[in-house]
Image (cartoon, rainbow, N blue to C red):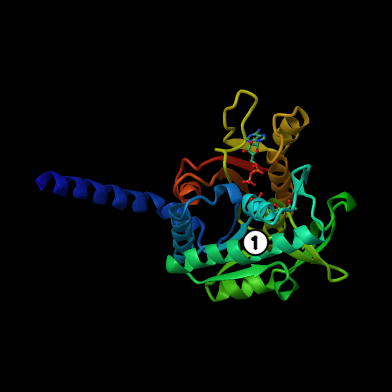
């Protein structure tokens, strides 16, 4: 019993110290806009989702304006498979015909978006689930005819997001946009998060994925990267596959006025909090040169 008491006292002291050490970061991020991209691979168990939701609610509670953009590639694959529709990727983007598009919108805007909204609300926040179609937020052009209904955002109207910030609500956005001729477009989640972060001139863009960060040729995570280093590592093939849209997004978002972009492992408990509120940070921080 006494041992238990001693343990509890020690834990409480650690919690108090952690809160105390977080103070400078809490002040720094007051009223900051933090855009978080939650990739399909980083959306694990219900427990992991509940943990992520608590982090987001904590951010909101200390005065940050969090915006969540989610992916869901693996879940779209699973649904397409169940429906017997084959799907392929070209340069990290899904070739999207009309049938595929219907499934993409259904899975992203339905199942996944509502799962995240519900988790945040259960954690005590007030989340609002949206796609880029709401309030005409995201307008796209076709990326490449070979990819079908895949869009690149050309304009992002952030007014709806600012209204939600004023009411302390948490936007949760599925990467779907509208074209000039009223078409629906499937947007890569990273690209969508970068475009929204750019339009908001966000203080941080956090790309939560399934690796610890951007790795160098020897497999070590590079904790601080400049744009020049990213270009070098892409040219020599060290940055490849799914990491290419992430680092490209990072550079575009920085050019658009985002202060810093971090690529980090979303499967690690409290990944976003570790990045924002500790001196260690987490993952790879990318800044302009
Ligand atoms: N230099 C690199 N550092 C880290 N990951 C890399 C690198 N080059 C390629 N990758 C790959 O990129 C993947 C992350 O992209 P992706 O699977 O599309 O993530 P998400 O589903 O979260 O969007 C990693 O799992 C890894 O296989
Ligand atoms: C055009 C395109 O590829 N869109 C993606 C959208 C979802 C996504 O980006 O999911 P992750 O973040 O989990 O990879 C797709 O259809 O899979």
**Which of the 4 image quarters holds residue 241?**
top right
Image quarter in which the C terminus is found: top right
User: 154 or 280: nearer the eye?
Assistant: 154
Count of number-bearing discs: 1
**Residue 92 seen in the current view:** yes
Q: Which residue is found at the position 71% from the left and 59% from the top?
A: 104
Q: Which residue is mark 1?
A: 107
User: 134 or 248: nearer the eye?
Assistant: 134
User: 151 or 27: nearer the eye?
Assistant: 151
Mark 1, secondary structure of its residue: helix
Q: Which residue is found at the position 25% from the left and 48% from the top?
A: 11
Q: What residue occupies the far left of the structure in this picture?
A: 2
Residue 102 rendering spot, x and y as whole percentages: 74, 64
**Which of the 4 image quarters holds residue 180?**
bottom right
- Rendered position, 127 above or below 243: below
Q: Is mark 1 within 8 Å of ligand 2?
A: no
Residue 124 rendering spot, x and y as whole percentages: 43, 69
* CA neighbours of label 1 inside 10 A, class few (<14), some (14 to 19), many (20+): many
Quarter of the render that holds ligand 1:
top right
**Residue 206 seen in the current view:** no
Residue 75 rendering spot, x and y as whole percentages: 62, 53
- Rendered position, 128 above or below 271: below
| Left or right for 236, reference 78 | right
Residue 51 rendering spot, x and y as whole percentages: 44, 55
């Amino acid at each position: 019993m006494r041992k238990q008491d001693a343990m509890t006292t020690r834990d409480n002291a650690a919690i108090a110290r952690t809160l105390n050490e977080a103070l400078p970061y809490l002040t720094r991020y007051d009223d900051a806009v933090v855009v978080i991209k939650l990739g399909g691979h980083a959306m694990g168990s219900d427990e992991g989702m509940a943990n992520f939701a608590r982090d987001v609610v904590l951010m909101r509670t200390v005065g940050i304006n969090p915006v969540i953009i989610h992916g869901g590639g693996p879940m779209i694959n699973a649904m397409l498979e169940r429906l017997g529709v084959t799907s392929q990727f070209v340069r990290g983007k899904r070739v999207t015909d009309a049938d595929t598009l219907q499934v993409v919108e259904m899975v992203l805007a339905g199942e996944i978006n509502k799962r995240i909204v519900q988790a945040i609300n259960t954690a005590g926040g007030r989340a609002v689930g949206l796609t880029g179609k709401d309030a005409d937020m995201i307008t796209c052009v076709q990326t490449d005819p070979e990819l079908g209904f895949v869009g690149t955002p050309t304009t992002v109207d952030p007014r709806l997001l600012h209204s939600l910030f004023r009411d302390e609500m948490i936007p949760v956005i599925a990467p779907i946009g509208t074209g000039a001729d009223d078409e629906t477009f499937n947007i890569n989640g990273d690209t969508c998060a970068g475009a929204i972060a750019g339009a908001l001139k966000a203080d941080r863009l956090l790309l939560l994925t399934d690796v610890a960060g951007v790795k160098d040729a020897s497999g070590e995570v590079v904790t601080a990267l400049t744009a020049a280093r990213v270009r070098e590592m892409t040219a020599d093939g060290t940055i490849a596959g799914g990491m290419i849209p992430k680092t490209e997004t990072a550079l575009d978002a920085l050019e658009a006025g985002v202060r810093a972009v971090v690529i980090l492992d979303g499967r690690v408990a409290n990944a976003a909090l570790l990045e924002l509120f500790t001196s260690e940070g987490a993952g790879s921080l990318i800044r302009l040169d």
